[in-house]
Image (cartoon, rainbow, N blue to C red):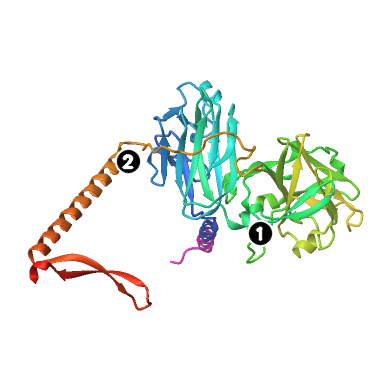
Amino acid sequence: MAPPPTSRCLALALILIGALCAAAAAARFAPADNHLLACGAAAPAVLPDGRRFVPDSGCASTRLRSSSPSLSSAAPPGSPPPPSSLLASARVFSCRASYDLDVRRRGHHILRLHFYPFVPALAAARFHVGAGGLLLLHNFTASSPVVKEFILPVDSDVLVLTFVPDSGSTAFVNAIELVSAPEELVGDIGTLVTSGGAAQIHELSSQVFETLYRINVAGRKVTPFNDTLWRTWVNDEKFLIDTDSSNYMVWSSSGRIAYPKGSKQMTREVAPDNVYNSARSVRPGVNVTWGFPVPASSRYLVRMHFCDIASKALYELYFNIYVNGDLAVKDFDLSSATGFLAYPYYIDFIVDVKDEGILKLAIGGLKKSRSDEVSGILNALEIMRMNKTSGGMDGDFPIDLHMEYVVSKGIGEFARSLLCGFIFVGLFVALVTLMVRLRTELRNNGTAWSWRQMNSDEGKLARTYQLVPSKTDY
């Protein structure tokens, strides 16, 4: 008897859902390098997003070097539970130490360092962290859970991540992520905004970036589970300087964002759908401004994301973009930039923040817009600090990041090194014995090795080795 129609429909729906899930999983970004280390842990830690962090003491593609034994520390019994199972342990260093992370594909990588001081001794730790010879963190301390994220170019087959305790202190880390970044994540051209105007600058791809803010404008928090690069985006409301709700509107869309087909610049790895499905718009004739506390005397990359989910037709929005009070783009027409509605687009701005310690971003509506309610729109933004010098994020400091010593991380590596040494000595002895025996046999047969110079075909002297009769044969 044939199954009822309801059962058949349910079965087809389940098959369709399974196929969609499989397609989504296949389309998810698969990095060539994907180091996920639970430092000091005795067992793997699995996060809600499905990623599996392995103990740093047993990873084949990672080597831990230190001039003295490092310690694995765990949260003591009775202490508050950690925010994540990934933060339940830590690797503690009393002297300079490093992780050697194998790199399969050179290029830009995302480096995330997780810190959680679950005991007072770790909260008091002061140390420096470097990667590839560049100082990332100087005089760093962690009084609460924090993730420090960097995007950096890697041009070698091994990235050396170094921890240097300050004098009389220690260093620690709870977890390490090193993930290959997609090529489209970092562009090479940006717009430098100053009080004198805006101009293009190049070679951004050679810089190192520290992520300070990822903002989902007018939207909910986006967790690593919903981001193909495992990023976190937070809501913008607490950063709004203009709190007059009559100046802006909040938009949300449940539709699928249409990424340009075949585009090497705009993909879901640049930003996920969730940040383009929400936006905050500005009315004609007014501005909406956001303010972000940042370290002073630094240069920043500001990436502003746009996606027109508010217009009913093309060419309805016209607005200005301001970076730290300076006009960055005048009469911006998003439709001309994309050619479609609900198409994502972003602009990279470069700005120097001097003594004020706050970075202000704004969109200003223009009365030339066709709508009386919507003139400009912003969906998301990112703020990243750029390295001041080629030696460090904060400049050049006399911190030695080079590991001039090589101390293995266990008896296993020592045994392997010793075995390799014995094999080399054995091969050398065998080679010498073979040469002595061959020479003896040749002498007994009345021949010997000799060499002479002869002219080559090109008229140059060539050295040749021959077997020639010895004098005893004459």
Eye-nearest disc, 2 or 1:
2
Relative image position of residue 116 (x, y in whole percent): 54, 30
Is residue 14 rendered magenta in the image? yes
Residue range highlighted in magenta: 1-16
- Please, what is the dominant secondary structure of the magenta stretch? helix
Relative image position of residue 282 (x, y in whole percent): 84, 48
Q: Mark number for residue 266?
A: 1
- Say which residue appears at 46% left-offset and 23% top-offset: 76
Which amino acid type is marked by label 2? Glu
**Marks 2 and 1, Cα distance to the nearest angstrom?**
45 Å
Residues at circles 2 and 1 in contact by the CB criterion of under 8 Å? no
Say which element carries label 1: loop
- Say which residue appears at 38% left-offset and 40% top-offset: 58
Question: Compared with residue 173, is residue 222 higher up or lower down, i.e. above or below?
Answer: below
Sequence-first disc among 2 and 1: 1
Residue with the mark numbered 2: 413
Left or right, 225 with reference to 307: left
Q: Quadrant of the C terminus?
A: bottom left
Question: Compared with residue 26, is residue 61 higher up or lower down, i.e. above or below?
Answer: above
Q: Mark number for residue 36?
A: none
Left or right, 424 with reference to 448: right
For disc 1, the neighbor class at 10 Å (few under 14, some 14 to 19, many from 20) is: some
Is residue 27 rendered magenta in the image? no
Which amino acid type is marked by label 1? Met
Q: Is residue 270 visible?
A: no
- Say which residue appears at 30% left-offset and 43% top-offset: 417
Relative image position of residue 459 (x, y in whole percent): 37, 76
Relative image position of residue 385 (x, y in whole percent): 67, 42
Q: Nearer the viewer, residue 153 or 38?
A: 153
Question: Compared with residue 171, is residue 458 higher up or lower down, i.e. above or below?
Answer: below
Q: Quadrant of residue 287?
A: top right
Q: Is residue 60 visible?
A: yes
